[in-house]
Amino acid sequence: MKYEFGDIILVNIFFTDFSNSKKRPAVVLFEEFDNLVVAGITSNVRMSGISIDKSEGVIKNSVIKTNYLFTVSKSIVIKKLFSLSKLKKKTLCDEVRSKICGGFEQK
């Protein structure tokens, strides 16, 4: 399956010590080879990031954590849940660009 920017997926996320894993939603930033670079999603709405509510497709009001980016193999994706709206994709793109590039100005 091909994944695109803004697709919300359900993926098995392993703990850093590989002792266990949990099913978690994440948003696809880009795909390369058989890997996906994603941003994690949490239902802890007090965390910083981009709000996403039930009317957009999530089970609970949630936050896209633009400060929690990681790479996963496509082989551990359980399924695609839905895709973000065009407006939410723009917000996500702007936020990720801001986090990564920060105050960098090309001279």
Image (cartoon, grey):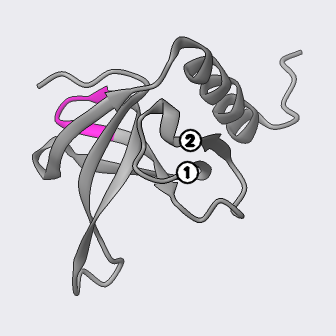
Residue 104 tag number = none
Image coordinates of residue 24 in percent, x first then y, are: 33, 59
Residue 49 versus residue 20 in the image, above or below? above
The quarter of the picture where residue 30 lies is top left
Q: Closer to the N terminus: mark 2 or mark 1?
A: 2
On the rendered structure, is 87 left or right of 54?
right
Residue picked out by circle 1 = 61
Three-letter code for the amino acid on which mark 2 is drawn: Asp
The residue that appears at 61% across and 15% down in the rendered structure is: 87
Mark 1 secondary-structure assignment? loop
Q: Nearer the viewer, residue 35 or 25?
A: 25
Image position of 35 (left or right of 44): left
Residue 26 versus residue 53: which sits nearer the camera? Answer: 53
How far, Cα to Cα, is label 2 from label 1? Answer: 4 Å
Query: What is the quadrant of the N terminus in the image?
Result: top left
* Residue 11 spot, x, y in % from top left: 24, 53
Residue 92 pos. (x, y %): 61, 29
The residue lying at 20 percent from left, 30 percent from top is 33
Residue interval drawn in magenta: 31-36
User: On screen, 78 above or below 97?
Assistant: below
Residue 15: image quadrant is bottom left
Give the amino acid at mark 1: Asn
